[in-house]
Image (spheres, rainbow, N blue to C red):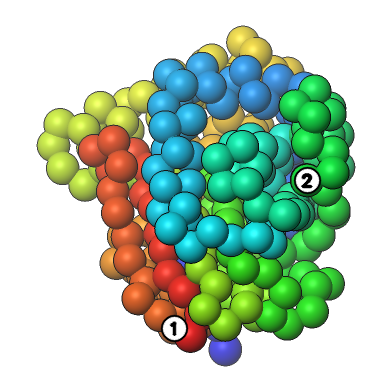
């Protein structure tokens, strides 16, 4: 039986619906303001974090990439520009977020390079051994079953293919831990309410960050589902973590 992780039990709305159903509805509701809020709340550092993840993948020159929890496609678009793959599939539960992503892809002239598909990360419809790289940026904490989602990511990865995950995390050391807790508990919900009518989303966000597997716990989980050379790298004093591994 798969181990349960804290972020799986953090739900945006209620205890009656599946987490996946609630996540889809929540992100559909904030799709129009998500990009502006995301960049504002991270002071634009999220672009640098994506750059670090892309730098990890660059030596492997992946030609087919699956971007899980692609949202509005920021990582997929950046990978298309910097890695020059043949094809990127952006997969997400939220059609609202992907609709924004499709507009961004069209403006960037990348329609032939990036496609969007609605997928449940715990039950991907792709064949085994389909992609050279699988990525996820700031979405693992939203997985309904993290271990199952990571197992699916490994399943669709080709032998020798690489995993790259970026996820928000909680700094471990003083004073960043205390400052980040204050920021996440007060500033994020306040700014979120200014930008969006969906108040729930920006209370859910800091709570889910605090209890998502991180650091060695995430590394152990990646190893448990079969990834080789699983590693964690703390970025920006531990506010974000970069997790990597490959399929043997």
Q: Is residue 217 above or below residue 173?
A: below
Residue at the extreme left of the image, as rendered: 174
The residue shown at (28%, 36%) is 236
- Left or right side of 61 for 174: left
- The dot on residue 208 is none
The kind of secondary structure element at disc 1 is helix
Asked which quadrant contains residue 103, the reply is top right
**Is the residue under label 2 in contact with that under label 1 (CB below 8 Å)?**
no
Q: Which residue is mark 1?
A: 224
The residue shown at (80%, 23%) is 107
Residue 241 drawn at (x, y percent): 37, 49
Front residue of this view, candidates 49 and 85: 85
Q: Which residue is mark 2?
A: 114
**In the rendered view of the protein, which quadrant contains the N terminus?**
bottom right
Q: For the residues marked 1 and 2, what is the alpha-carbon distance in whole angstroms? A: 31 Å
Front residue of this view, candidates 221 and 236: 236
Residue density around tag 2, few if under 14, some if 14–19, many if 20 or more, within 10 Å: many
- Left or right side of 151 for 97: right
- Left or right side of 78 for 122: right
The residue shown at (32%, 60%) is 232
- Left or right side of 11 for 54: left
The residue shown at (74%, 54%) is 87
Residue 10 drawn at (x, y percent): 57, 52
Q: Is residue 144 above or below residue 93?
A: below
Q: Looking at the image, is mark 1 or mark 2 earlier in the sequence?
A: 2
């Amino acid at each position: 039986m798969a181990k349960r992780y804290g972020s799986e039990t953090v739900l945006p709305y209620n205890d009656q619906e599946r987490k996946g159903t609630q996540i889809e509805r929540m992100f559909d509701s904030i799709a129009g303001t998500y990009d502006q809020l995301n960049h504002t709340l991270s002071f634009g550092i999220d672009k640098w974090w994506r750059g670090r993840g892309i730098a990890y993948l660059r030596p492997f020159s992946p030609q087919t990439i699956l971007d899980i929890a692609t949202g509005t496609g920021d990582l997929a678009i950046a990978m298309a520009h910097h890695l020059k793959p043949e094809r990127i599939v952006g997969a997400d539960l939220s059609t609202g977020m992907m609709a924004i992503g499709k507009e961004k892809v069209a403006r960037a002239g990348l329609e032939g390079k990036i496609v969007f598909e609605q997928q449940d990360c715990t039950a991907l419809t792709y064949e085994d051994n389909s992609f050279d790289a699988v990525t996820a940026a700031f979405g693992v904490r939203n997985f309904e079953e993290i271990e199952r989602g990571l197992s699916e990511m490994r399943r669709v990865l080709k032998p020798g293919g690489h995993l790259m995950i970026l996820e928000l995390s909680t700094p471990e050391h003083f004073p960043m831990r205390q400052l980040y807790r204050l920021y996440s508990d007060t500033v994020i919900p306040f700014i979120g309410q200014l930008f969006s009518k969906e108040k729930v989303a920006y209370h859910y966000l800091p709570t889910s960050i605090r209890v998502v597997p991180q650091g060695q716990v995430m590394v152990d989980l990646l190893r448990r589902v079969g990834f080789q050379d699983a590693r964690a790298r703390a970025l920006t004093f531990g506010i974000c973590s970069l997790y990597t591994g490959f399929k043997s």
